[in-house]
């Protein structure tokens, strides 16, 4: 629980997200877990985490609470009241005591019972049950010619593989096998697609989140949220060969087309540029973001980076070399998953408030289509014809025509579908489901 709040800088996730992350069933169980650990109620614990985040940022940057409040888009008076309510002291006095003083006050307030939670090892991964597959939904055949070259799946759920441990991100390598992050199991799972089965796993670090494959297919980088590093994995020898230490918990990642540069976002709301070579990586620059999340995209030409600012409601376009701001779109809501077309002309961005934005990158103009349910991750078929949209809270994946934005089919996956990946030929798709399985789509 503490790790989850630290990852979000004290921004309290929804009750459902907290329950799912902890592998519990109700918020009442969450409350009991906190009481047994000697910790305050969830809302109060989130407030303490927020105060500690502000103190850490104040020590790191020298910024005032007023500046930090504006960066977080929170009313400054609310921040000052929160500090006084929790600590019983004004911000000026709390600031002088620093992070160490605040942690001491927290432990004293709660009689030290939660101290091992703040400093002890992470909790044991909680595994989720497998679920049987639902009936397939069939996507209409190609609309171009009778002789149809299948560059996208036909659109039906063909197989399901039980996979406990919070499956989250998925990437398919050049050899046709897939690599899956399992956040609660702390591993990178190796899958073969035909037949659909596990080939084993590689321990990579705590809370592996995003996996990025090198263009050569020989190496992968995995963001580990709670070990503050990016694991370097040799996919040929199949073991972790190194790690790139990060400032903050790494969230999203993307690699440049030439495979020489890695871009990583962290929970400190920063984007880092890392020069990578072999088992090593070196941070060469970074820039502040309005609000970082696990999603980030790169222009196919490699010259632009696109970062949805999540709860800040904006999408930013940055120069990939200098990280200077090029453009900014006020999309509103909670922009999240995004993908750029292969020709670099359009960007699709899902929004947790229930809509899809299409940004025309040549003109900067955007259009919108409402879905009425939160959109999370997005994937584009290799032939650029269809979008697969993860409707996590609805337990579905929508298949949408990339031009008309009309829904042509829906996959009833159940659970909570997350990231989606396609093989290079476009015949197959794999959907990670954080509830405890992986689906294969033909």
Image (spheres, rainbow, N blue to C red):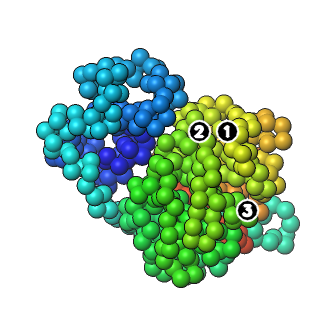
- Point out the tag, 2 or 1, that comes first from the N-terminus: 2
Numbered tag placed on residue 289 in the rendering: 2
Which image quadrant for residue 140? bottom right
Taking 119 as reference, is 440 above or below it?
A: below
Q: Secondary structure at mark 3?
A: loop
Classed neighbour count for the residue bearing mark 3: other residues with Cα under 10 Å, few (<14), some (14–19), many (≥20): some
Say which of 212 and 135 sits in front.
Answer: 212
Distance from the alpha carbon under mark 3 to that under mark 1:
20 Å
Residue 435 vs 115, above or below: the answer is below
Q: Position of residue 438 (x, y in %)?
A: 49, 67
Mark 3 and mark 1 lie on one chain; the one further toward the N terminus is 3
Residue 435, visible in the rendered structure:
no
How many numbered marks does the figure carry?
3
Q: Secondary structure at mark 2?
A: loop
Residue, x 53% and y 35% (percent of image)? 311
Q: In the structure shown, which secondary structural element does the residue marked by tag 1 occupy?
A: strand
The reply to whether dot 2 and dot 1 touch (C-beta < 8 Å) is yes
Asked if residue 208 is positioned above or below residue 365 in the image, the reply reads: below
Quadrant of residue 366 within the rendered picture? top right
Location of mark 1 (residue) = 316
Crowding near the residue tagged with mark 2, few <14, some 14–19, many ≥20 C-alpha atoms within 10 Å: many
Q: CA distance from mark 2 to mark 1?
A: 8 Å
Left or right relative to 80: residue 296: right
Dot label at residue 21 = none
Q: Is residue 10 above or below residue 346?
A: above
Name the residue at the left extreme. 111
Q: Which residue is mark 3?
A: 257
Rounded to the nearest angstrom, the CA distance separating label 2 from label 3 is 23 Å
Q: Position of residue 165 (x, y in %)?
A: 38, 64
Image coords of residue 151 (percent x, y):
75, 68
Q: Is residue 326 left or right of residue 116?
A: right
């Amino acid at each position: 629980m503490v790790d989850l709040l630290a990852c979000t800088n004290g921004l309290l996730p929804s009750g459902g997200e907290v329950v799912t992350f902890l592998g519990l069933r109700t918020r009442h169980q969450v409350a009991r877990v906190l009481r047994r650990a000697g910790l305050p109620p969830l809302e109060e614990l989130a407030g303490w985490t927020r105060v500690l985040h502000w103190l850490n940022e104040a020590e790191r940057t020298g910024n005032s609470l007023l500046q930090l409040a504006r960066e977080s888009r929170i009313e400054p008076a609310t921040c000052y009241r929160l500090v006084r309510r929790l600590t019983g002291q004004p911000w000026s006095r709390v600031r002088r005591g620093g992070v160490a003083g605040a942690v001491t006050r927290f432990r004293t307030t709660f009689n030290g019972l939660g101290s091992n939670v703040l400093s002890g090892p992470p909790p044991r991964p909680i595994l989720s049950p497998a679920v049987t597959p639902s009936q397939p939904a069939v996507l209409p055949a190609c609309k171009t010619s009778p002789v149809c070259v299948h560059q996208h799946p036909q659109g039906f759920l063909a197989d399901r593989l039980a996979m406990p441990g919070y499956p989250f991100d998925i990437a398919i390598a050049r050899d046709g096998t897939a690599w899956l992050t399992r956040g609660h199991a702390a591993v990178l799972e190796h899958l073969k697609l035909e037949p659909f089965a596990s080939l084993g796993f590689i321990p990579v670090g705590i809370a592996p989140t995003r996996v990025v494959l090198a263009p050569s297919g020989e190496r992968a980088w995995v963001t580990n949220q709670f070990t503050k590093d990016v694991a370097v994995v040799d996919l040929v020898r199949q073991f972790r060969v190194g790690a790139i230490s990060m400032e903050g918990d790494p969230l999203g990642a993307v690699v440049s087309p030439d495979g020489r540069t890695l871009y990583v976002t962290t929970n400190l709301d920063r984007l880092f540029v890392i020069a990578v070579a072999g088992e090593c990586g070196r941070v060469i620059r970074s820039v502040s973001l309005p609000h970082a999340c696990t999603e980030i995209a790169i222009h196919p030409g490699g010259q632009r980076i696109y970062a949805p600012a999540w709860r800040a409601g904006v999408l930013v376009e940055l120069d990939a070399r200098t990280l200077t701001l090029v453009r900014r779109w006020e999309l509103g809501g909670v922009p999240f998953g995004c993908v750029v077309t292969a020709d670099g002309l359009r960007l699709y961005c899902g929004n947790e408030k229930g809509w899809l934005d299409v940004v025309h990158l040549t003109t900067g103009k955007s259009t919108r289509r409402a879905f009425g349910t939160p959109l999370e991750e997005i994937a584009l078929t290799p032939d650029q014809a269809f979008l697969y949209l993860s409707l996590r809270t609805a337990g579905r994946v929508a298949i949408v025509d990339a031009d008309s934005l009309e829904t042509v089919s829906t996959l009833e996956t159940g659970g909570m579908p997350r990231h989606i990946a396609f093989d290079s030929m476009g015949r197959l798709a794999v959907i990670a489901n954080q509830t405890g399985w992986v689906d294969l789509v033909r």
